[in-house]
Image (tube, rainbow, N blue to C red):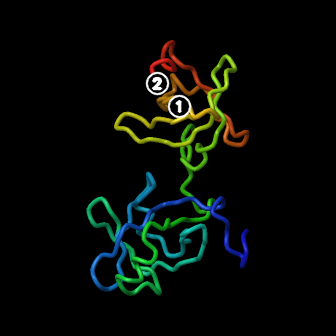
Amino acid sequence: MSRAGQPSPEELLVVARILRPHGIQGEIKVLPETDFPDRLLALRRAYLIHRDAVREIEVEAARFHGDFVLLKIKGIDTPEAVRAVQRAEVAVPRAEAVPLPEGTYYIRDIIGLRVTTVEGEPLGRVVEVLPSPAHDIYRVQDDAGREVLIPATREMVREIDVAGRRMVVTLPEGLREMQ
């Protein structure tokens, strides 16, 4: 826990990102950052992560608006108040996260993993997870800034050990040289 009993950003999972005001009553257009966007409709208590500060919020209402969700947060009642928290993240405590099926992971848990090949060659750390239509792609960067893109498939990713902060991959011959 951080000061004042608030959880630290590391103890939270981001479920949405604030985009912009919607209307003049303080509704907030958010982009769901979860595979379970329906959970946002039942959200009543959450945390706002903004400029490395964490504060608890009370969600008064939520509804879908196309691919987005409109939230009404207590105390944010004007478009100007929404703009003051633009680009903030809406998060929930890890303990309240939707349980994931075996073999799936939260992106936040993947970022920072040390990556080695099955032969033991270090490749670097996962610095970004890129979504793609077929599967995610892990962007791995070494200390010299060299990058390799690894498809997040069972054929490529042999082991993920979140607790040990490591990932073991199989690279097809020539993949590293192509990048």
Q: Residues within 10 Å of mark 2 (few under 14, many from 20)?
A: few
Q: Quick one: label 2 or label 1, which is nearer the N terminus? A: 1
Quarter of the picture containing the N terminus is bottom right
SS type, badge 2 = loop
Kindly identify the residue that appears in the image at 63 percent across and 63 percent down: 9
Location of residue 26 with respect to 159 vertically, above or below: below
Q: Is residue 50 above or below residue 175?
A: below
Disc 2, disc 1: CB below 8 Å? yes
Residue 29 quadrant? bottom left
The picture places residue 58, in percent across and down from the top left corner, at: 51, 80
Q: Residue at x 41, y 69 (%)?
A: 41
* Residue 167, visible in the rendered structure: no
| Residue nearer the viewer, 136 or 81 | 81
In this view, 141 is above or below 56:
above
Rendered location of residue 176, percent (x, y): 51, 20
Q: Amino acid at mark 2?
A: Gln
- Alpha-carbon distance for marks 2 and 1? 7 Å
Q: Residue furthest front?
A: 144
Q: Nearer the viewer, residue 118 or 95?
A: 118
Q: Does residue 170 appear in this view?
A: yes
- Left or right? Give the position of 88 relative to 79: right
Residue 42 screen position, x and y as percent: 45, 70
Q: Amino acid at mark 1?
A: Glu
Where does the image place residue 121, in percent across and percent down from the top left? 67, 21
Residue at numbered disc 2? 179
**81 vs 92, nearest the viewer:** 81
Residue shown at 54% from the left, 75% from the top = 45
Q: Which residue is mark 1?
A: 147
Residue at 67% x, 65% y is 8
